Image (cartoon, grey):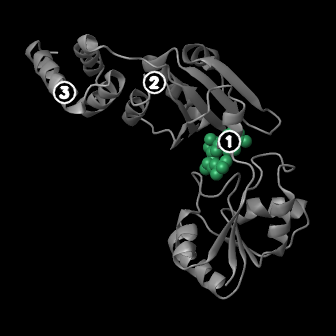
Amino acid sequence: MGTLFVVSTPIGNLEDITLRALRVLKEAGLIAAEDTRHTKKLLAHYGIGTPLTSYHEHNEREKAKELVDRLKNGVDIALVSDAGTPGISDPGYRLIHLAIENSVQVVSIPGPSALMAALSVSGLPLDEFTFKGFAPSGEARRAFFLAMKGTGRTYAFYESPNRLVDTLKDMVALMEDADVSIAREMTKLHEEVIRGKAEEVYRSLTGREIRGEVVVILHAREEKIKEADMASEIESLLKEGFRLNDVVKAVAKESGAPRAQVYKEALRVQEALKGEGK
Ligand code: SAM
């Protein structure tokens, strides 16, 4: 049996690779890479000549089977993505899962991840945090933030530069005083971290052309709604156009009241609004 090595690679600066990662990439029989052209540059920089094969989101299913067959025939395989840690919002899951199912040993070669790098310099509380992958777009994005509002927790997500300002706009509409840290182009020439209240960060980025790669970290202020204020909170969220279920989830979280009770109240408020023709 070969071993499947899950190898983290740099997120920009080629110096950010561990000695162990270099040795494993050199000694493996095959490197499965998200984009072989991209990984070739890394390998060329370090004089590594290991053969490459592509493993990406469009061929994951068939390729995972093929690679597990190679592992079962004794070939050691190193899995890499374009940048950072494979499997973290990147291809990897199917191969790793199938390898485990087939009793292949799976070994982590830890190293960079944009997520961890952004969290580590955010200055926000990190005893626990929730990683949300890529932020959704459109209507789903408002519900995404509504679920965070009032929780007193830290969240991290990936975002594309051209959607960042619109995303912040939706965040500000619900949580203008959330503490935000935006890490852009980490480990690269134009690296920057923009920190502040959601409202300030939004204002400072509006009208600016944002380029490169971005991770957003935010800490939602803890808010407790008193039961007496529940109806007015429900009313204002419904008037803003949020779906009943999303409102119920958020208000139950913020008030600590049982979801069934909030649901009943929300139906009552919804009916009353209909009666007023709103
Ligand atoms: N698996 C990768 C990891 O562990 O870093 C993440 C892959 S995900 C497809 C790519 C996203 O990671 C980008 O859209 C961006 O949000 C973030 N990212 C990657 N490199 C970055 C960098 N140097 N600076 C800031 N964000 C980065």
Q: Which residue is the extreme one toward the left?
A: 275
Disc 3 + disc 1, Cβ < 8 Å? no
In this view, 225 is above or below 110? above
In x, y percent, where is residue 98? 53, 73
Disc 2 + disc 3, Cβ < 8 Å? no
In x, y percent, where is residue 152? 49, 24
> Viewer-nearest of labels 3 and 1?
3
Disc 1/disc 2 C-alpha distance (Å): 24 Å
As helix, strand or loop, the secondary structure at mark 3 comes to: helix
**Across the whole image, how many numbered discs are drawn on residues?**
3
In this view, 16 is above or below 31? above
Q: What residue lies at 17% left-to-right and 22% top-to-bottom?
A: 265
Which badge, 3 or 1, is on the more N-terminal residue? 1
Can residue 175 be seen here?
Answer: yes
Q: What residue lies at 57% left-to-right and 79% top-to-bottom?
A: 103
In the image, taking residue 59 as reference, residue 49 lies left or right, namely right
Label 2: few (<14), some (14–19) or many (≥20) C-alpha neighbours in 10 Å:
many
In this view, 155 is above or below 63? above
- As drawn, the label of residue 116 is 1
Residue type for callout 3: Gln
> Ligand 1 appears in which quadrant?
top right
The residue indicated by pointer 2 is: 170
Ligand 1 within 8 Å of the CB at mark 3: no
In the picture, the quarter occupied by the C terminus is top left
Residue type for callout 2: Asp
Can residue 211 be seen here?
Answer: no
Disc 2/disc 3 C-alpha distance (Å): 28 Å
As helix, strand or loop, the secondary structure at mark 2 comes to: helix
Which badge, 2 or 3, is on the more N-terminal residue? 2
Based on the displayed image, in which of its 4 quarters is residue 187 positioned?
A: top right
The residue indicated by pointer 3 is: 261
Ligand 1 within 8 Å of the CB at mark 1: yes
